[in-house]
Each structure stands twice: as C-alpha cells, then as structure tokens.
Image (cartoon, rainbow, N blue to C red):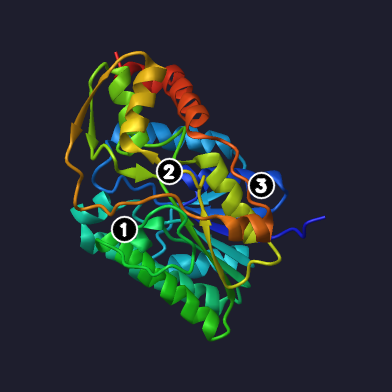
Amino acid sequence: MEQRRKILVTGGLGLIGHNVVQRLMAQGHEVAVTDIRTNYGLVPQDELDYLMVERRKKIPDARVHSIDIADQDGMDWMFKQYQPDTVIHLASFPRQKVVNVNPMTGSQTMSEGLLNLLEAAKNHQVCKFIYISSSMVYGDFVDDVTEDAECSPQGQYGIMKLAGEWLVRDYSRRGFFDHVIIRPSAVYGEYDVEDRVVSKFLLTAMRNGVIKVNGAGETLDFTYVEDAADGIVAAALGHNTANKTYNITKSHSRTLLDAAQLAVKIVGQGTIEVRDRDLDFPSRGALNIDAARKDFNFNPKVDVEEGFQRYYEWLKHSVYWSKKTV
C-alpha cells in the first residue's frame, strides 16, 4: 500500500491543479492547497468566479488558502502548519499570451515566487519537489522529441519556465531535496477558461461563429486534463522518478485545422478561417513519453475525439456557458 504523503499543491484550484488534488485525496494523502484565484488581468471576473466555484466543488474537503507563493511569511506559515514532505508546484502564469501582457507580474510569480517556494521547501526539509514546466521550453520541435533534446525557448514564458527548471535542479544538486520536472503540452478539458485554443474553438462553434486558425499546418500535442493529472500524480508518488524530467502528454500531434474541423463537426455549426501562423509561438509537434511509460506506467487514455466531445458536453450543460453561447 502506498505510504500516506503530506503534500502541498500550489495553484491547486487551477485547471490541472484541482484534478491533481482530487486524485491525491482519493488516494488518501493529506493535501493542502494554496491558490490566489488570479484572473491574470485577462479572464473576465464572472467567468473566473464561476470556474473557481465549480472546481472547488470537485475537492470539497481540501484545505485551501489564498496565500501567494511570493509571500515569504505566508509560505513559512503554510509549511509550518502542514509540514509537507512533497510539493507539487503548479502556481504559475499559465501560458505565453498572459506573460506577454504583463511580463513583470509574470516574473514575480514564475521566478521570484518559485525561489521563495524553493527556499521554504529547503528550510522545512521537504523531500520531493515537483515542478510543472511546459513543452514551450523546447522552442520549435517536431514529433517524438525526448526530454534530453536541446531547449531553445521562444518568448518570455518558455524562457522563465526553463530558468525555473534550472533553479529546481540546483537545489537538488546542493542536496536539499529530490525533484521531478514535468513538461505537459496543450492541456484542455472541462472547467477551463475560454481563452485557450480548444475552448475558443468549441465555444466559437457553439456561437456559430468563425474559428480563426493561425496556421493550418501548425500542430499541438493536445492532452486531456485528466490524463495530464494522472501523469503528474504518478510522477510525484513514483519511487523511480527522483531528479528526472518527464514529458506528460498524449504524444499524438494534431493540426490546428484538424482541431477546428473537429470542433465544427462535434458542435454541428460554425465556420473556419485559416490565417498565417502566429510567429510569437513556436511550431510544436508530439512529445515522446517513453520515459514516463517506463518509470511509472503512464498511459494517456483519452484521444482528441473523445476529449473534445467530453468538453463539449460539459460546456453545453454548464449553467454559465449555456448562457454565453445563445
């Protein structure tokens, strides 16, 4: 039987975070959560409020605190209060667009906040630190990229994620704790905000609008949120994962045009406009997940067709989104 862990999850009310917390609690682990419920200056407040309430319903027994990871006194209190042996660090600006809008605030969270959290983990004798990075650290890449591939990030989001990886590794090098680095890609699913690729495609189709595809041949390794959460939890709890880096994705790239066409097919309406690719974003393919399969039997189950359908059914029956698509 798996040893009961004491785990701190930062960003535990996020799209991925609340799924991770739900799985940890179902396995009987003691979980504490910190999340400041920020809208990043981009997400409409009523949308965020709705999503936070719905995500919270999925983890009703979780102990959630609104303490910023950059708050030294607050983090010191969290670690003293809960004495976690494991940290799963998901609190971050979630994507490149958000960082581009406010890079200074992004840096405060992604760099200063991370350092504050690492210092707290060091000072309170944490055993394992799981850092959620991003496939954006690779920059341009084609299918089957492995974790040892050269990283050439484009844009401040990917650069700060990669810098975070090096900071985490340095604390392990100095012997303070073991780490695991996770690189997910294009995570989507129920309880997500609208300002993401899959959400935009489905909601635009539901409004019978025009889906704008930035580069017909551009691809993404679309990963259903439940698969991503399963991989993160397995890596965090695994006995053969210390000081390793893992791609956690579906490992199957699909073009943006394919995704838009699938959204139109599922919804039954909507049109598509193909435009030039957005040069602010790297071209990305599918990531190789052999290491995760080998070390902790990672096996993503939900393909794009099923994942899009599940997400659409949730949007269609959502009290909030049903009013926003008429």
Residue 109 visible: no
Cα–Cα span, label 2 and label 1: 14 Å
Task: Say few, some or many: other residues with alpha carbon within 10 Å of mark 1 (under 14 / 14 to 19 / 20 or more).
Answer: some
Q: Nearer the viewer, residue 206 or 284?
A: 284
Residue 107, placed above or below residue 270: below
Residue 25 circle label: 3
Q: Amino acid at mark 1?
A: Asp
Q: Which of the 4 quarters of the picture holds residue 312?
A: top left
Instruction: Name the secondary structure under disc 2.
Output: loop
Locate residue 118, reporting x and y percent. 47, 73
Residue corresponding to mark 2: 253
Q: Amino acid at mark 2?
A: Ser
Cα–Cα span, label 3 and label 2: 32 Å
Task: Say few, some or many: other residues with alpha carbon within 10 Å of mark 3 (under 14 / 14 to 19 / 20 or more).
Answer: some
Which residue lies at the image location 43% right of the left edge and 45% below the top edge?
Answer: 221
Locate residue 33, reporting x and y percent. 53, 53
Q: Nearer the viewer, residue 267 or 177?
A: 267
Q: Are marks 3 and 2 in contact (CB under 8 Å)?
A: no
In the shown orientation, is residue 308 left or right of residue 62? left
Which residue lies at the image location 49% right of the left edge and 37% below the top edge?
Answer: 55
Q: Amino acid at mark 3?
A: Met
Residue 321 circle label: none
Name the front one of labels 1 and 3.
1
Give the farthest residue toward the right. Answer: 1
Indicate which disc, 2 or 1, sits on the residue closer to the N terminus.
1
